[in-house]
Amino acid sequence: DSPSSSGDDTGDDGSDDPAPDDGDDDSPSERSDELNGTWLITTYPLAGAAGEATPIGDDASIEFADGTVRFNTGCNTGEGEYETFGAYQPENDDGIPEGQPISFGSLSRTEIGCEPELADQDLAIGGAIRAADLFEFDGDLVILWRDGNVMIEAQPA
């Protein structure tokens, strides 16, 4: 018998069939598309100090769309390019959190003078985005990391 051309693959070894996509396993995958959209920043690192801060006001956000990142620090806005690469990996025993590598190109931003209470937030959020090199999803949150430190934590807008 010759192979059927009906598109119904009932092959005996399945070697040409793609592996099933089981979102509950720990196998590496691509999750870059899940970044697309606008995220409200809920946590960022304090500039020049240990600890985290919650943004003042409701404007601090980050938006990912097809290789372009846009952000609002609550005072200034900016944009640039980003790239994800590799695969989304589970957490490992060396303390590397689960996630997928991300890199940001140069980021342009406005230079509006911020009110004093927003000035530190403005610098910290812009710097945190530039520094991030890994992203992960934790429930509904997206978290940007650098060397095991949270740079940005955000929820869907």
Image (cartoon, helix red, strand yellow):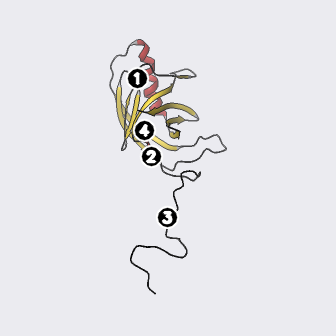
Q: Residue at x 49, y 31 (%)?
A: 152
Q: Mark 4 belongs to which amino acid? A: Phe
The answer to the question of whether label 4 and label 1 lie on touching residues, with beta carbons closer than 8 A, is no
Q: CA distance from mark 3 to mark 4?
A: 32 Å
Number of marks in the rendered image: 4
Give the label on residue 104, or none: 4
Q: Which is closer to the viewer, label 4 or label 1?
A: 1
Decide which of tag 4 and tag 1 comes sooner along the chain: 1
Decide which of tag 3 and tag 1 comes sooner along the chain: 3
> Which percent across, then down, holds residue 21?
51, 57
Pick the front one: 91 or 57: 57
> Which percent across, then down, holds residue 137?
52, 40
The residue under label 3 is: 18
Give the label on residue 32, or none: 2
14 vs 69, left or right, is: right
Q: CA distance from mark 3 to mark 1?
A: 44 Å
Q: Which is closer to the viewer, label 3 or label 4?
A: 3
Q: Residue at x 50, y 31 (%)?
A: 153
Decide which of tag 3 and tag 4 comes sooner along the chain: 3
The residue under label 1 is: 58
Q: Residues within 10 Å of mark 3 (few under 14, many from 20)?
A: few
42 vs 65, left or right, is: right
